[in-house]
Image (cartoon, helix red, strand yellow):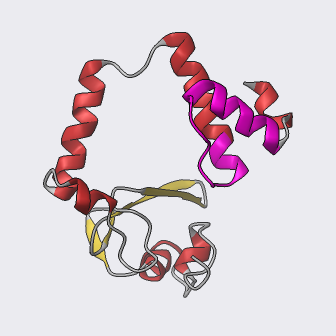
Amino acid sequence: MAALKIASTAELKQTWRDLFHREPPPFNRRFLEIRLAYRIQELAYGGLKRESAKRLELLGEQLDGGKLEVRRRRHGNRPIAGTRLIREWQGTPCEVLVCVDHYDYNGRRYKSLSSIARAITGTNRNGWAFFGLGSARSA
């Protein structure tokens, strides 16, 4: 797995083909590294236990009522529903759940990431930048 960090992008893509038996997705290098590292561990140690996979499926159904088309739907340029955005602020981990029509942070609904960033920091901030997503315009 350590070799993934120093491999070229072409080498990562070839490793993807070898491990997944299909073409790699057109995502960035970091995505390829993370997914390949997981796949290597999965092959070495086994995948998720049946109970864990079932639990994840149930959690997904809570978000989308079991409808895959809802799970995959994007609203504008929002991240896909079910995505968890994690950011540490002043030593405290902050986790936001992207839902179909809102964001959930600390059990409260928010319409924008900027309002969550303001709740966390106490100052006006670009929520997309705060959570490392770039700007809303470039997404």
On the picture, is 20 further left or further right than 72?
right
Seen from the viewer's position, the closer of residues 113 and 31 is 31
On the image, the x and y values in percent for residue 35 come to 58, 37
Q: Position of residue 134 (x, y in %)?
A: 63, 74
Q: Residue 120: image x %, image y %?
A: 48, 72
Foreground of the two, 17 or 52: 17
Residue at horizontal 64%, vertical 32%? 17
Q: What residue appears at the point 41 percent right and 56 percent down from the top-left corner?
A: 83
In the displayed structure, does residue 21 sit left or right of residue 59?
right
- Relative horizontal placement of residue 39, taking residue 112 as reference (left or right): right
* Quadrant hosting residue 131: bottom right
Q: In the image as oriented, which residue stretches furthest toward the top?
A: 45
* Magenta range: 9-32
Task: State the residue in front, 39 or 2.
Answer: 39
The quarter of the picture where the N terminus appears is top right
Give whichever of 85, 48 is nearer the camera.
Answer: 48
Q: Compared with residue 21, is residue 98 higher up or lower down, i.e. above or below?
A: below
The mark tally for this picture is: 0
Residue reaching furthest to the left: 65
Give percent across and percent down for residue 21: 56, 29
| Residue 28: in magenta span | yes
The answer to if 21 sits in the magenta stretch is yes
Question: Considering the image in quadrants, where does the C terminus appear?
Answer: bottom right
Query: What kind of secondary structure does the magenta stretch mostly adopt?
Result: helix
Q: What residue is rendered at 19% in x and 57% in y?
A: 64
Name above or below for residue 97 compared with residue 39: below
